[in-house]
Amino acid sequence: SDFHSDTDFLSGKRLTEWLCPHDSDHVRPEPPEPPDWFYIFLQAGDLVELQFADGWWPVTVSDVPVAGVSFEVKSSKPEIFPGLSCTVTAPSLRPAWQWQGPDRDVCWKFLLKNGSAPCNLLHPSTPLVLFT
C-alpha cells in the first residue's frame, strides 16, 4: 500500500494543518543552513540529522571515511528507525539544531565533539556552536 503518515487513510488526500494567527508565536521557524565549515568538523559520536523519507531524522556519526565528504551514520533513536545504518554524503546531513526560542540572543545551537571550531554569537540568526 502507498499510505503515508501525511495522507488521510480514507480519502487518500494529503492532510493539511492550519495555524491560527496567534499560533505562529508557538511554532519555531525552519533552522538555518549549516555553516560552511560544519562538515569538516564532524567526527564519530557527533549527533546530526539525516534527510530520509521526507524528513530529518536523528542519527549519530559512527565513522568518517573521507573527512568532510562521506559519513557513516546510525540511528540515534533505534525505537524509531531500528537498524538504520548507512554511508551518506554531506548534503544528506545537517546539524542536530536545538531551538532556543525567539527571546534568546541566539535562536539556534548545535553541539559537536570537536572543540577547535569557531563559535559565533553575533546575531540571533547566526548559529551558536557548543562543543562537548
Image (tube, grey):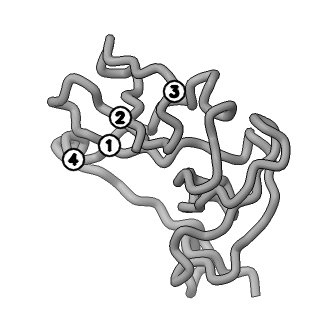
Assess disc 1: are there few (<14), some (14-19) or many (≥20) residues with their C-alpha within 10 Å of its C-alpha. some
Q: Earlier in the sequence, mark 2 or mark 4?
A: 4
Give, as a three-letter code, the residue at label 3: Ser
Q: Which residue is drawn at the image coordinates 57% and 85% (left, top)?
A: 9
* Nearest-to-viewer mark from 1 and 3: 3
Q: Earlier in the sequence, mark 1 or mark 2?
A: 1
Instruction: Tell me the residue that label 1 is attached to.
Output: 99
Left or right: residue 105 compared with residue 119 = left
Give, as a three-letter code, the residue at label 4: His
Number of the label disc, if any, that sits on residue 26: 4
Above or below for 15 versus 83? above
- Quadrant in which the C terminus is drawn: top left
Helix, strand or loop at disc 3?
A: loop
Left or right: residue 61 compared with residue 58 = right
Number of the label disc, if any, that sits on residue 116: 3
Total residue callouts: 4
Give, as a three-letter code, the residue at label 1: Trp
Assess disc 2: are there few (<14), some (14-19) or many (≥20) residues with their C-alpha within 10 Å of its C-alpha. many
* Nearest-to-viewer mark from 1 and 4: 1
Helix, strand or loop at disc 4?
A: helix
Number of the label disc, if any, that sits on residue 15: none
Q: Which residue is drawn at the image coordinates 41% and 38% (left, top)?
A: 131
